[in-house]
Amino acid sequence: MLLGVRGSTPAPGPDHVRYGGHTSCVAVIPIGGAVPTLLMDAGTGIRRLPDLLGPEPFHGSILLSHLHWDHVEGLPFCRAVDRDDSRVDLHVPEQDGVSARDLLARTMSPPSFPIVPEGLLGSWRFLPAPDGTASVEGFEVTAVDISHKGGRTLGYRVASSTSSFAYLPDHAPSRGMTQAARDLIEGVDVLLHDAQFLESERRLADDYGHATVEESITLAEKAGVGRLVLFHHSPVRTDNQLDRLLDLLDSTVPVVVAREGMRIPVGSAGDQQA
Ligand SMILES: [Zn+2]
Ligand SMILES: [Zn+2]
């Protein structure tokens, strides 16, 4: 389920009600499961995790695409993860020879924040993101470096035995795309991709290191994905503008505009949900 679909900064207010104002977070429910065991990023959308868990704690892993605020700032404000009986493996893209824990502590420690990572309640492990392909919570997870701006950014492919999705919330294809990045999205059932800007806003997209809606559609078509989910909306894009987003665009693959609370079956069997 999409818990937060916004990029850069939360966007509350009357013009952002239907698509939601929370920043990036996606809950993944495994085959035959009832609750999520994997989260993609921990933007403010993670605060909606109790919608799926009820009174229960989260037991699972969080894969961070990168450490920009809009992807981590919900972490200490989610009562499903910050409690005595939670169990969380947080996977962080390591860089500069700094450990996962210390990278997180750069923004989560005084004077920037009241607590350090160890101040989170529950059983936490701060781990490096997978180097290549690894098993995480029973999923086959592949991580690949992708172009963005300001630090290391990973794109992920998450596969079960019968289905797969890719998650690239912050991605600047115009800065170059490796073969590994192309392989990551090739033929996935669902591609969640950066769609923060429009081609008419090309200069902003280049400045901030993001994709345009049109670029995302082209990538999805070339990769032969089953469905494209336009994700990481600009905080200034209103509900009415998002309603009209697809009216002017043609695509040979099915496209949906990400909306907070949306459930997306992955694969023909619908055996996992993003
Ligand atoms: Zn972002
Ligand atoms: Zn970013």
Image (spheres, helix red, strand yellow):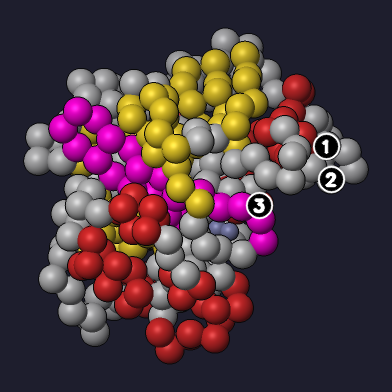
Q: Residue at x 55, y 23 (%)?
A: 89
- 56 to 192, vertically: above or below: above
Identify which amino acid the numbered label 3 is placed on.
Trp
Number of numbered callouts drawn: 3
Q: Quadrant of residue 209?
A: bottom right
- Residue where numbered disc 2 is placed: 112
Say which element carries label 1.
loop
Q: Magenta part of the protein: which range?
A: 150-169
Q: Position of residue 52 (x, y in %)?
A: 38, 29
Residue 13 appears left or right of 17: right
Q: Which residue is mark 1?
A: 109
Instruction: Tell me residue 245's x, y (percent).
Output: 30, 76
The residue beneath circle 3 is 69
Of mark 1 and mark 3, the one earlier in the sequence is 3
Judged from this view, the residue extending furthest toward the bottom is 200
CA distance for labels 3 and 2: 12 Å
Question: Does 6 appear above or below 80?
Answer: below
Pointer 3 or 2: first along the chain? 3
Q: CA distance from mark 1 to mark 2?
A: 6 Å
Q: Could you tell me which residue is drawn at 45 percent across and 56 percent down?
A: 169
What's under tag 2, amino acid-wise? Ser
Q: Quadrant of residue 193?
A: bottom left
